[in-house]
Structures are given as structure tokens and as C-alpha cells.
Amino acid sequence: MRRDVIHSLLVANRGEIACRIFRTCRDLGITTVAVYSDADADALHVREADLAVRLPGSAPADTYLRGDLVVAAALAAGADAVHPGYGFLSENAAFAAAVQDAGLTWVGPPVKAIELMASKTRAKELMAGAGVPLLAPVDPATAGLDDLPLLLKAASGGGGRGMRIVRELDDLPGELLAAAAEAASAFGDGEVFAEPYVERGRHVEVQVMADAYDTVWALGTRDCSLQRRHQKVIEEAPAPGLEEGLRTRLHDAAVAAARAVGYRGAGTVEFLVSAEGRPYFLEMNTRLQVEHPVTEAVFGVDLVALQLRVAEGEPLPAPAPPSASGHAVEARLYAEDPARDWQPQTGALLTLEVPDGPGLRLDTGYVGGDTIGVHYDPMLAKVIAHAPTRTEAIRLLAGALERARIHGPVTNRTLLVRSLRHPDFVAARLDTGFYDRHLADLTAPGAGDPATACSGNPATAALAAALAEAVRATTTPGPALTPTRFGAWRNVPSQPQVKRYRSEPDGAEHEIAYRTPRTGTPEPYDAPGIRVLAATPDRVTLELGHLTRHFSLTRDRDRVYVDTAGASYTFTALPRFTDPATRTDPGSLLAPMPGTVVRLAEGLAAGAAVEAGQPLIWLEAMKMEHRILAPASGTLTALHAAPGDQVEVGALLAVVQEDLDAAPVPASVPEETA
């Protein structure tokens, strides 16, 4: 068989996965080539590559989804191979063919295998012939009450786009139209199919690796049941609690699926496992998965290195995969606010520091000082823990996330820690409805928060922030203060001073009183049981009863980040008095996140009558679409948004003068995450 030795590899992707592939290339002595959009000009994957080629523009459709530009970039850089990563063009058969037509080595499966698995409907037909267990399809035109609930899915693509759960027959026609429209917009293919929705099902998948010499490895199982908006949040290997007979059946079905399409390289066969333990084929992802590190940890392999080996025409190193060892858990760290409909967050990432140590791994496309933009997925990093047992791996991962220092936009870090410690997760009672049932408790402040259990409460952290600021104010050089007689009051350092903070993202306000005695060390005012042991602008040590606790502080303009053992807090310093200019008119519709206005309701203009809950404006950012809804029935008195507008968070989009007899509704609703 022909051998194509790879000397220079272009990664047709960005962010975390590009950096991860580059890491293996450096180990193998392969020159790395990055592509980047204008929005990614200073991105980490560009800085880490040996060479980089610009793709003009910022939107994915103009850059990372332009296969012709990516192929041209590979040729211009002298690359002799292309790795697609995941997402973007990774499962695009036409792109794979174009890479090979250009004389480049494609680090992926055969074009025919991609084509056969590209449509979920055609893939299911093929799998039925291979004896892979399937859910029986349902014809939406003849669906009845006995078929409910139904799951509508886009035939092409993934990431939850075009997916709907239907529990009422009356909702089926509208949901079909909505799913088809979303699928057509996201994937250029509006085909949608229906199948039974399995309540409390588990998402279990099998990693396969195949070469051109008829060797197919089944590298164990992964459980990816903890999902939000049909996207995975926490994954682990092996999938816990499966009977050995079920594991064998899953492995055999995955190998049969790979052989049925003549597969080569890394791929994943995904299954839904019912509460009764029956597996059903979902789809085959003809690429590397986001969660591949947990398999690498358990089997001691480098899947990217194996992909490159197979692409070069080499056989897998053995007829059977290596033995598994231990347990691995991965958490996806997102810049998003789970308590507010998973809204993606943007802005400067000031600090990203995750503890390093035995059994821990960090895959990321960001470092402190980078900026999180609006154009791409909000995942910051993946944190992976590997240990001899599941219990140890969970503990290691939760502890690493707790001790991480993450300053900047709101993240899902607290949700991840709470999820890992939730009794259902600890007991491996897993299914895809985990967050539907537990999200409110997992995002509620106070009870159940490791922060309150380990380090007092947010008010104590706010006190540390105020004390540190008081020290900074007395030690930072500045202009001399001249006493004045204006006003009816004056600040006297030895008398109580007050600072106000707003906790982010919950919005709770904390008013902290302190005074600075002649010793020069500020101390809390009227707070029995709290003693200041040390205070500097960056670190405060408090004695809380009989417990000594340290607080580290980082500032960025009016924000202060407080880290302590078991908890992290973000506060915004507030003025002593409310600024009337910050108030907005009743009925003002503000952008819940920075993004792009993609469309307006038909005929929307100032003076138009609107109904409560009517979608008025569609805003898109970081692969999430939000509908801005009329808060109540009334009249649109102002419209400040137009398709194509780039808006910042809090920007005034429109104003509705409401009918006072109408009931209010939420102002925005997220559509889906890709």
C-alpha cells in the first residue's frame, strides 16, 4: 500500500482542537500550519503554529467553512496533509475530496464513509442491514398519541440544531416546520425525521479506530449523558454501570458499523441506551470527538498520533487495542451563564489557571489575556482527570475546577463542580434529562454551594475585597487630598467607611462597613467573630471564629475577583449613590449578550402593535440564537435594531409601550446551541 509520510500538517480548525493537534505534531516532528479568521488573528492556535495563513473575514461561513480557501492555504504553506479537527468541515465529504484532489493527504476517513454517514436517515438504513440495533422510525404524517413523545432530528449536521421534543400532537406541525427551517439554516438541508423519544435514556458511545488492513479497534465506552441543549457538558470513560453483556453488544455493534462503511481512522458510534438497558444506534461521527481525551487517558493512547499513522498508510500497532486502566472524567468549561438560559459570554479573559498535577490534563485554546469573541463556540477549555477509580477521578476533577483561577466573563465552573458532586452523578444515575431536573438547584445561590460550605459566604468575600481596596487606597501613590468644607459630611479614616458591591452573575448587593484605626490595618465594623490577620492589596487573611482563611484578589477596572479555598467570587464595585442616568425606560428591550441582529419580525417598525410573547428581534452570538420577545401587548414606540447590526450587551434594541392590563413575559428566549 502507498505510504504518504507527513512532514507538514495544516489543521483546518481553530482554538482548543487545533492546539491539541499541534501538540502531537510537535512530538512527532511535524511542521504545523494554522488557518485563522480576522477575529482569530491573535488566537492561541495561531501563536502556537509554525506557520499561519489568514482567511479574510470573521464569520465561519466566510472563513473556516470555506473549503476552497482552506485547500489554497495548505498549498500556499507547503503543507502535505490536512487534519479537519471536529466541527466546521470535519464531516464534509466534498471538502475531504477537494483535499485529496489537490494532492494532499486527508487525515480522516474515506470520502465514501463520510457520505454514507452524513445523513442520519440513510445511515440508519445502512446500520439496519449490518444488524446494528435501531429505534423504529415514525412517520410524522401518521403519528398518533401512542407514538408520543417524539424526537424530531435534522438528517444532516449535529450539535442539537434542528432537534425538537414533541409531547403534544397539536404541537407537531409547528415543530416540524421550525426544525426544518433551523436545519436548512444550519446545514443547508431541511430534511427532518422523527423517532420515539426515549425518556431517561443514556448517551453512550464507542470510540473506534480502523486501518486499511481490516483491523478495527473498539476502544471502550464513554458516557456523555450530561448535556445542555443536546450538547455534552461532562463525559467519562468507561461508561459506568453497564452490564458486561451490554458492553460487548455495544463494542460489536460499533465494529460492525465501521466495517459496513469501510471505515479508516478515528470515529465514534453513538447509542442511546434505555433505562431498561436496550441500546439503539443514534449516529456515527466520522471524525475525532471533543471528548476523546477520556479514552486516551484510559487506554494510554494518542488518538491523533494514530490518525496520522493510519493516514500515512501504516497499520495499527497491534491487532487488538491496548488494555484499559482506571477511569477518566472530562468537564467542558464554557463562557456561559447556566442560570440565565446558558447565555454565552464574551470579553477579556484575564486569568485562566487550572492546577496541574498527576492525573490532570488541560486542553484549551485560550490563556489569560486573550479575548472571547462573539463568532465561535463559547468553550474555553476541557479539564480531564484520570485516576484508578471513578470516585477518585471525580474528586480530582472537582477539586481542580474549584482551585482554578478564572477571571473575566461568567463561566459554568460552579455548575460543573456541583454536577460532579451531585448525588445522582456520584451514584452514576445518569440520563440526558439530568439538567432538566436539576438545573435550578445546581445554579441556585447558597444551599449546596461548595463556597458556602468551605469559606463562609459571598458577604465575607466582599468584606475581603473592601479591606484590600482600603489598603490599596492608602498605599497607592496619588495626589495629596486637600480638606474641603463642601457638603454636610466628610470621610474620617478612623470612622466607619462603606463600600458597595454587586455579586456577579446573581446581582446580589453587599454593603460592607469597615474602619481604619491608627494601626493602619483596616478592620470590619460591627462584625463580631471576624478578625483581620493580614491585609494587602492582593491578599487578605481573616480569622472567622476559629478558622483562618486566605483570600486572593485580582482587579480589572470596577471588577474584583476573589479566590479562596473552595470558592471564587466576582464583584462589581458600585457607586455610593445610584446614578439616575443608568435607568432605562419601562418596556426597553436590551441585548442580553453581544452579537449580531440576524432578522426582525415581518413588518416590524415604530408604531406597530405587538402581542405579549411575540418574537420581535433575533440576535445571534457564539452559535446561539436568542429571540427578543415583546414583554407585553402594546405598541412598539422605538426600534433601534436592523439586520446586520453588531450590538453590545445592554444595547437598547427597541421600546414597547405596554398595555397595563397585559401580563409580562420574559424578554428573550434562547433558540438552540450548535
Image (cartoon, grey):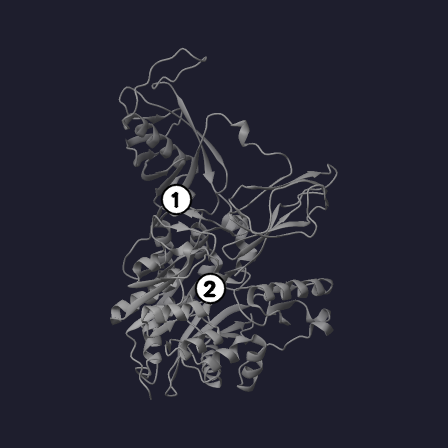
Indicate which disc, 1 or 2, sits on the residue closer to the N terminus: 2
Q: Position of residue 233 (x, y in %)?
A: 46, 60
Who is closer to the viewer here, 609 or 169?
A: 609
Q: Is residue 249 visible?
A: no
Q: Amino acid at mark 1?
A: Ser
In what element is the residue under mark 1? strand
Q: Toward the viewer: 354 or 76? A: 76
Mark 2 highlights which residue? 428
Identity of the residue drawn at 42% across and 38% down: 571
Q: Which sits in the foreground, 316 or 297? A: 316
Marks 1/2 in contact by CB < 8 Å: the verdict is no
Q: Give coordinates of residue 251: x percent, y percent.
A: 45, 79
Amino acid carrying mark 2 in the image: Ala
Q: Secondary structure at mark 2?
A: loop
Q: Residue at x 48, y 45 (%)?
A: 447
Query: Looking at the rendering, in which quadrant would you find the N terminus?
Result: bottom left
Q: CA distance from mark 1 to mark 2?
A: 27 Å
**Image check: 47 left or right of 610?**
left
Q: Which is nearer the eye, 410 or 221?
A: 410
Residue appearing at x 72%, y 46% in the figure: 611
Q: Examine the rendered structure and indicate whether residue 523 appears above or below residue 588.
A: above
Question: Which label is found at residue 568?
Answer: 1
Percent position (x, y) of residue 506?
50, 41
Q: Is residue 311 left or right of residue 601?
A: left
